[in-house]
Image (cartoon, grey):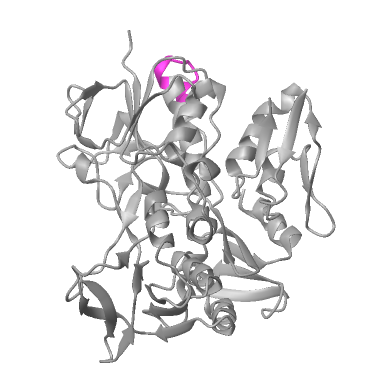
Amino acid sequence: MNHPVVIVGASMGGLRTAESLRRFGYAGVITIIGEEAHKPYNRPPLSKEVLANEVTHEAVAFEERAATADVNWILGTRAVSVDQQHTTVTDSSGMVHPYSALVIATGLRPRRLHLANGDLAGRHALRTLDDAINLRAQLTPGADVVIVGGGFIGCEVAATAAKLGCDVTVVHNSAHPMLRPLGTELARQLQLRHEAEGVRFLLNRSVVGLSGDKRVREVHIDDGSSIKCDVLIEAVGSHSNIEWLEGTSIDLTDGVLVDSAMRAINTSGSVIPNVYAIGDVARFANPIFDDVPRRVEHWNIPTETAKRAAAVIAAQLSADEKFESIVNAQFKPVPSFWSDQYDIHLLAFGSLGLADKVTLVAGDATDECVFEYHRGEDLVGVCGIGMRSVVQSYRAKFI
Amino acid sequence: MIKVEVDMSKCQHYGQCVFEAPDIFRLNSDDKLEYTAEADDSERANIEAAIDVCPMQAIRIVE
């Protein structure tokens, strides 16, 4: 009998891999190992609805499908090592799981700041449901909330906290929040909108230390000033969860390097045929843009890469004669993302961060608008507020 | 037949579902989502793909 397909990471990507394996005809055992106690749930509401309301796991959990009712879930458990020679994964309870194919779907964890007096209570990051529930209890009206990092997560949390009546300051290390992905004009408009809602920005600044008695009471800024703080939220990027893969032959330079079939690549540049990676942790080249492998932290990527990996795994394990043609099929998922802040609903396709030129092509930046993002002559992204049909029409340009 | 349900209190009209199941979901001239509530069984895979890509997880198949 074949060993199970072992998926490490019980989030959206892991779930979609299991579902897709069934859809592509794999009928063998599927084991999913996940560190969180919860079954997979949708993360985007964590910075919005879950912070603002008494939302439970049930409300954000992905609906379970009949095809994956027999998945063997091992939750509240981390994978700690891989033995490639014996094709096994060992988990934190000491159990050893033999695999026919291993899917790495361990994603990211928030980067944390190194601060003077960093052991004070009141520091938060936001990645998991439990993070959001813990933070929710602190976001009371009048609380002094300091958010470090003015990216999308930082700004969404700022909007939610401001609506809850908190006194919000965002400390950000460039000239505008969300500047790098969005470009100056759109970033500036969003900043103005936040300011109109009472959010303050300390720009081109960073936090260097904390003070307080057990709990944080003040945050110290690199210009020598200090601001009052009851709740500190760190939204300063993330680290790949790859430490458990140390000692393997996999190229772990930045996440897990994979080929276009989501198969892991070793440090000599060769394909490892029975190890796959998907989601935020997978670094792959997307021919829409170029041949540079990149990790992509957009919400649709775990699902796209999960489906891709599952098609290849199902063909591999059934010794399908079409295996080679499935592996060689082009894989060029169109990154898509959105962000909700107040009544502003951003929708984007492509990789805005690659652009060197941003152009308003429709509407008015103070209202509904569409921006194009170019690198040289090439269109690499589109982003709009409202004007959905116009933004939608761009997606076909990338396919 | 498959019965499709969209929770319109969750839907933000991002229209990602339109790409996966264009015969079921569409944006109208006001950029609001419209959908066909009853679909042929042959649409199941497309509708499940639409469920997968819905940012708000607002779509479900009522079994």
Question: Where on the picture, by quarter, is residue B23?
Answer: top right
Q: Is residue A247 left or right of residue A15?
A: left
Q: Is residue A392 left or right of residue A150?
A: right
Identity of the residue drawn at 74% across and 65% down: A387
Taking depth in this image into account, of A76 and A392 the one nearest to the observer is: A76
Q: Is residue B46 visible?
A: no
Up the image or down, A151 lies above or below A319; here it is below
The answer to whether residue A317 is magenta is yes
Residue A48 coordinates in the image, percent (x, y): 53, 60
Taking depth in this image into account, of A297 and A343 the one nearest to the observer is: A343
Q: Is residue A360 visible?
A: yes
The answer to whether residue A286 is magenta is no
Which residue extends farthest bottom? A224
Up the image or down, A324 lies above or below A135; here it is above
Which residue extends farthest top? A1
Taking depth in this image into account, of A161 and A302 the one nearest to the observer is: A161
Residue B48 coordinates in the image, percent (x, y): 63, 33
Region rendered in magenta: A316-324
Taking depth in this image into account, of A330 and A172 the one nearest to the observer is: A172
Residue A25 coordinates in the image, percent (x, y): 51, 17
Up the image or down, B14 lies above or below A6; here it is below
Which residue extends farthest left? A247
Identity of the residue drawn at 55% across and 22% down: A66
Q: Is residue B53 left or right of residue A209?
A: right
Up the image or down, A384 lies above or below A367; here it is above
